[in-house]
Amino acid sequence: MDEQLRDSQPTPETPDAGPVLDQMDDLGLTETAPTRDTRTSASSRTQKDTSLGYELYLNVRTLVFVLAALILVFTFVVRIIVVSGSSMENTLQNGDSMLVWCLGYEPKQGDVVVLTQRSYQNDSLVKRVIATEGQRVDIDYDTGTVYVDGVALEEDYIKETMRVPNYGEGLNHVTVPEGCIFVMGDNRNDSADSRYPNIGIIDTRSVIGRAVMVVFPFPDFNLL
Amino acid sequence: MKNRRPCNVFWLVWTLLLAAAAAGVRMWQKATAFEGSYGLPVRGATASVVLVCVLVIAGAALAILAARQPVTTPPRSQIRGRRWDMSFFATGDVVFLALVWFGAFCSLAAVPLLFGQGRELWKAYQLAVAMKTWQGGDNGVLGMVTAVLALLAFLGLLQIGRDGFRPGRRGKGGFWAALPACAGCGWLLGTYRNCAADPVLWDYVPLLLAVIAGMLMYTDWAGMSCAAARPRRTLWLAGMTVVCSWVALASRPDTGTALLLISQSASALAALWRLPINLQHPPKVGSEDKLIPAVPQGTEMTTENKEEDTHE
């Protein structure tokens, strides 16, 4: 908005002192004002006095601005979220840190998403989108197959063959309402997801974003 | 603004009007733009769109005011002490003192509340860890850190008020603002941590913006004493601090957070009250031995929008 204003006196090489001194000369003040040499020595002294505080301040200011920028970026654009639990094994391991893209994201089938279903818990969940609005989901536990709109999904990402959960079959034949998604964990036998009645169909407004990559630990680094 | 009258009234009136408008719209949004038991946002709600517009308009209006703010650079001989270090000198100005100290004591009042909350969460965290039931979340450490930093902010604001009201021989008008700026860093981290799993941006973005605006304002305020003055940006940030703080207050935060918001809002109003006056009519106090023999009256030079201060 405005250029930086230095309140220390300029060095002799600094051209900005010229106009002020010249203006004072024009006003006939040269007899009462100190000479340029006197000012020069005062200038050096002042700069020495202020240099430490100035440099320190610049570092603090840089840190503050960087912190503010990072917080804004990590609020509106991306987030780092740590996986808690084993429901997405083998795609994601407990403790993995993921980069999650938030800006303008609309859930699509097959995406790994981070969401918060407040009816279940206040912390976030990581699941895979199985179906989006208008699609029909049918789960056949006998064959361990998920059908979306009558077509069997090829799920090479799941950990093991799906069995009936300990809470029963739950939601296994459902058409996803408008503005909602049906999600499941890749570890089907140890995942609380849309099949579980307390979680159920997820409103897309509860979705924080799409998991883009695992960034930590480094051995697990990969794109999702 | 051309007739040499201080602009602080413009700043205060516009800032308070914009802040009141933004807070009003935020309350309207709270009443109409969320649905369901978990407060999911209504898509395309009018109040949300209007609130964004009001915030953008506030930023633009305050930027225009800042751009038009006259900055007087007097002749070297009339300056005692450092020019920008004196930007918050307010000798005998009770309003400035009252606002800054009110902000200071609000910050102090927030300390036990924030610390108590943090301590409760820390106890719950320790219990959960002992029972091996900890599933992540806020363990209270950042809350307690924020409380300690709020205490430092109290000391900084107290000293700013004192330095401004009775300036010493050498100015330290803004140096102490570095303390509330540091407190803002801790507060920002704590606020962000608490909302990391919240999918509804409107639940926490007003508070984040308020904390960021306040933190940057205090940083620029401190810069006045560190040879890195940006007076117009400081004014803009002070205005935005008031606007964003009022919006965040309209969101009905917890008491500790509300006190911190009131604190930075009062400090920002103090800056808006005093800084425009001192930019137009720089105070003439400071070390007597630095005086250069006086010049005749009426030789003051005005450099509107041309800022490179070269005075000691």
Image (spheres, rainbow, N blue to C red):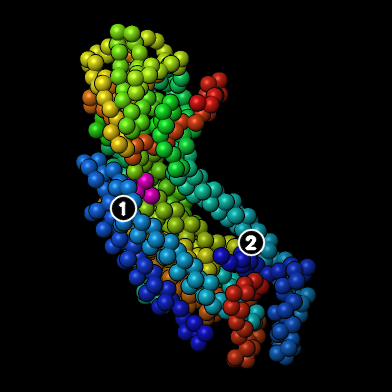
Please name the residue shown 49% across and 68% down the image: B63
Work out how far the residue at label 2 is from the one at label 1, CA to CA, in angstroms. Answer: 52 Å
Residue B237: in magenta span:
no
Q: Is residue B160 visible?
A: no
What is the x, y in percent for residue B230? 56, 65
Q: Name the one closer to the observer, A77 or B75.
A: A77
What is the x, y in percent for residue B85? 55, 68
Q: 10 Å neighbourhood of mark 1: few (<14), some, or many (≥20)?
A: few
- Under mark 1, the amino acid is Ala
Q: Which residue is mark 2?
A: A50
Q: Is residue A161 visible?
A: yes
Q: Which mark is residue B45?
A: 1
Q: Quadrant of the C terminus of chain B?
A: bottom right
Can you tell which quarter of the image residue B305 is in?
bottom right
Q: Is residue B306 above or below residue B55?
A: below
Q: Which residues are magenta?
A: B201-205
Asked whether the beta carbons under mark 2 and mark 1 sit within 8 Å of each other, the answer is: no
Q: Secondary structure at mark 2?
A: helix
Please name the residue shown 32% across and 66% down the image: B21
Please name the residue shown 70% across and 79% down the image: A20
What is the x, y in percent for residue B191? 38, 45
Residue placed furthest toward the front: A150
What is the x, y in percent for residue B36? 22, 42
Q: Name the one closer to the observer, A78 or A210.
A: A210
